[in-house]
């Protein structure tokens, strides 16, 4: 009777343990995915802040007049964009050392190219008629575009599931190296 009692107890206990472990794994995976989704959105917001800065030359060129009020509103808007960039620069620095360098490079390229375009925009006459709103000027920021592509790749790498990243970065090269050794030796 003792053997049947212990066998009867162990089945439900094992089932409870397995159920608990499955629930723990599901909870852990869900939390990981939620954190990754939040990070993905925040990395996207950091890129959006850079894009807002790159749009400043267009906003400056489309300013409606050259009064102190217009310049004050524009200066306030530029200040808000600058604050947003600083916030995201520091957020990225806290989140990922891998992405920090790439984001900083993106910021440098954007500030150099869009900054020059902003200076040119300030030196153009303000718009005085509706017909002048279509600027007919397409600004090109090739260094920014290249840096943006590097940032997107770095973020993709950062958000990749760590075991997959580890396999790609460490296991696959080792297997290729072993394969090359066997082929040559």
Image (cartoon, rainbow, N blue to C red):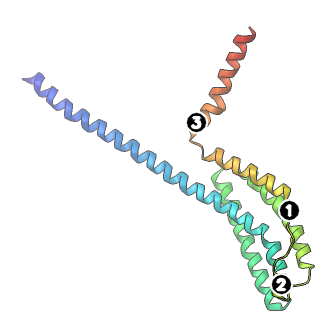
- Label annotation for residue 164: 3
Residue 105, can we see it?
A: no
- Residue 49 is left or right of residue 65, and the answer is left
- Mark 2 element type: helix
Query: In percent of the image, x 68 and y 61: which residue is there?
Result: 46
Query: Mark 3 or mark 2, which has the lower sequence index?
Result: 2
Image x and y of residue 88, in percent:
68, 62
Number of residue marks? 3
Residue 140, labelled with which disc? 1
Is residue 155 shown to the viewer in this render? yes
| Labels 3, 2: front one | 2
Q: Can you tell which quarter of the image residue 148 is in?
A: bottom right
Determine contact: label 1, label 3, CB under 8 Å: no
**Gap between marks 2 and 1 measured at Cα:** 23 Å
Compared with 71, 110 (above or below) is: above
Q: Helix, strand, or loop for circle 1?
A: loop
Query: From what the image shows, is residue 112 above or below residue 162?
Result: below
- The x and y percentages for residue 128 are 85, 89
Calculate the distance from the C-alpha at mark 3 to the C-alpha at mark 2: 54 Å
Q: Earlier in the sequence, mark 1 or mark 3?
A: 1
Task: Name the element at disc 3.
Answer: helix
Q: Quadrant of the C terminus?
A: top right
Measure the alpha-carbon separation of dots 1 and 3. Answer: 37 Å
Residue at image position (64%, 57%) is 43
Q: Quadrant of residue 73?
A: bottom right
Pick whichever of labels 2 and 1 is earlier in the sequence: 2
Identify the residue shown where x is 40% and y is 42%.
25
Quadrant holding the N terminus:
top left
User: For the point 85% across and 82% down, which residue is it?
Assistant: 132
Residue 63: percent from left, percent from top: 81, 83
Residue behind mark 2: 131
């Amino acid at each position: 009777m003792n053997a049947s009692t212990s066998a009867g107890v162990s089945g439900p206990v094992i089932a409870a343990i397995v159920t608990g472990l499955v629930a723990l794994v599901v909870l852990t995976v869900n939390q990981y995915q939620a954190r990754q989704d939040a990070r993905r959105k925040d990395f996207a917001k950091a890129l959006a802040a850079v894009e807002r800065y790159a749009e400043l030359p267009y906003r400056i060129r489309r300013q409606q007049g050259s009064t102190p009020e217009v310049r004050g509103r524009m200066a306030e808007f530029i200040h808000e964009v600058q604050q947003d960039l600083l916030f995201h620069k520091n957020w990225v620095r806290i989140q990922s050392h891998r992405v920090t360098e790439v984001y900083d490079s993106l910021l440098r390229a954007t500030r150099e190219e869009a900054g020059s375009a902003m200076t040119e925009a300030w030196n153009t006459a303000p718009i005085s008629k509706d017909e002048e709103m279509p600027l007919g000027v397409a600004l090109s920021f090739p260094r920014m575009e290249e840096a943006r592509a590097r940032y997107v790749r770095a973020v993709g790498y950062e958000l990749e599931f760590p075991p997959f990243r580890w396999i790609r970065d460490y296991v696959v090269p080792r297997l290729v190296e072993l394969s090359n050794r066997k082929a040559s030796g």
